Amino acid sequence: MNALVSTLGAGWILAVLLLSARIAALLLMTPLLYAAALPLLVRVLMALGFACVIALPFAGTPAPAPHDFGVLLQALLHELAIGATLGLGVLMAFAGFALAGRLVDVQVGFGIAQVFDPATRTRVPVLSSVFGLFAAVFFFLVNGHHALLRGIAYSVERFPVGQPAPLAAAAEPIAREAAALFALGFALAAPIVLGLLLVDFALGVISRNLPQMNMLVLGVPVKIVAGLLALWAWAATFGAPAGRLYAAIYRTWTAWLATGAR
């Protein structure tokens, strides 16, 4: 163990430890790893592996050695705060998909039926769970995980490990992403929601002209069929609004990381 420490250097090992805390906090705030049933040990080893690989180019400038345990704990908490702030940007983008799923569930009538969602470990309506899993799959299909790793490396470049970072400067970019979250989430589900509103309007006209018909019995299957057909037609145009949701992650990161030391 002493030979390993002397070979790699205590500073580099400390940099890996602090960087793994940043990456672990980021992964904990995102639903990417929760979408698959990965054991806790595997997630911890992934965070340590990412930290080791990313810390290799920075081996020449290791983290400053702390003077005591209190300083080390403070640096560790600071790295956790940086990772959680980065993860919050990712989490809000996925929340846009959750918002779109809830809107569709309410319109179709699936809001009552709930299933277990492995991405969030909670019980959610049927289509909300589908939207969440589809968002995770689409994130990997567009190579979002590559951009995620590049963003982590860029955060190390802008905010060196063990150095203070302007956490308060992240408030404005995150607030802007949160404000755009509702607009982008509604834009994602807008074709389906507007289509089902037209179905509601048509059912209202029928109910007005044919009061002897039971609209509760007739309306539920009609809205389910119309909603599923709208989902099928909407799938072809899913990419553009989903891409804008993912682009919001990197706009938020870039606006915050640009405040780092040059």
Image: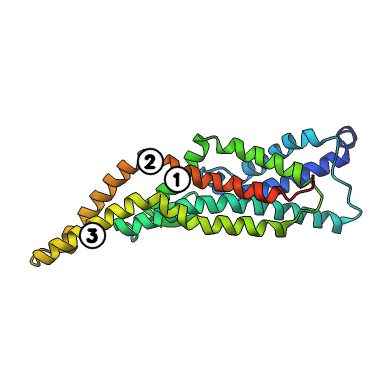
Instruction: Please say whether residue 29 is visible from this viewpoint.
Output: no
Residue at 44 percent of width and 41 percent of height: 240
Residue drawn at x 66%, y 37% as measured from the top left = 150
Q: Is residue 99 above or below residue 43?
A: below
Which three-letter amino acid code belongs to the residue tagged 1?
Answer: Pro
Q: In the image, 6: left or right of 148?
A: right
Residue 166 percent location from the top left of the image: 75, 56
Quadrant containing the N terminus is top right
For label 2, the residue is 237
**Mark 1 Cα shell of 10 Å, populated few (<14), some (14-19), many (≥20):** some
Between disc 1 and disc 3, whose residue precedes? 3
SS at mark 3? helix
Q: Position of residue 249 (x, y in %)?
A: 58, 47
| Horizontal side of residue 45 vs 94, given as left or right | right
* Mark 1, secondary structure of its residue: helix
Q: First in sequence, mark 3 or 2: give its number.
A: 3
Q: CA distance from mark 2 to mark 1?
A: 8 Å
The residue carrying mark 3 is: 200
| Residue 44 position in % (x across, y down) | 66, 44
Please tell me whether residue 211 is drawn above or below residue 245 in the rendered image: below
| For the residues bearing labels 2 and 1, Cβ distance under 8 angstroms | yes
Q: Label 2 neighbourhood size at 10 Å, few (<14), some (14-19), many (20+)?
A: few
Q: Which amino acid is tagged 2?
A: Thr
Q: Quadrant of the C terminus?
A: top right
In the picture, the disc for residue 241 is: 1
- Cβ atoms at labels 1 and 3 below 8 Å apart: no
SS for dot 2: helix
Counting from the top left corner in percent of width and height, residue 169 is at 70, 57
Question: Which mark, by number, is residue 137?
Answer: none
- What's the amino acid at mark 3? Asp
